[in-house]
Image: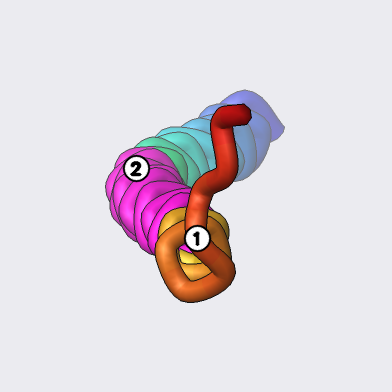
Amino acid sequence: MDELWRQTVETRLIAAETRNAVDEVHRQNVEMRLGSIEDILKWLVRLILGALVLAILGVAFKSGINLT
């Protein structure tokens, strides 16, 4: 009975350690992907803001800026 219990506990421990290792790798991959998404969003926001600034400047210069 003791040998069967030891094997069962050992099998469960190995399974838990394997799941832990897989989860850690998965977490690292998710962190890398989220970092990439954040970088892409940062550049997308910059692009949109730059387009808005250029559109405002284009309208201002096309209609002429009247300061008087």
Look at the image and say whether residue 52 sits in the magenta stretch: yes
**The C terminus lies in which quarter of the figure?**
top right
Q: Position of residue 35 (x, y in %)?
A: 34, 42
Q: Residue at x 46, y 36 (%)?
A: 20
Mark 1: amino acid: Gly
Q: Position of residue 12 (x, y in %)?
A: 59, 41
Looking at the image, is 10 positioned above or below residue 36?
A: above
Q: Residue at x 42, y 62 (%)?
A: 61
Regarding residue 7, the answer to whether it shows in the image is: no
For disc 2, the marked residue is 35
Q: Main secondary structure of the magenta part?
A: helix
Q: How is the image coloured?
A: rainbow
Look at the image and say whether residue 5 sits in the magenta stretch: no
Earlier-in-chain disc, 1 versus 2: 2
Q: Residue at x 40, y 45 (%)?
A: 42
Quarter assignment of residue 6: top right
Q: Residue at x 66, y 32 (%)?
A: 5
For disc 1, the marked residue is 64
Q: Residues within 10 Å of mark 1 (few under 14, many from 20)?
A: few
Q: Secondary structure at mark 2?
A: helix
- Residues rendered magenta in the picture: 28-54
- Residue situated furthest bottom in the rendering: 62
Q: Residues within 10 Å of mark 2 (few under 14, many from 20)?
A: few
**The N terminus lies in which quarter of the figure?**
top right
Mark 2: amino acid: Gly
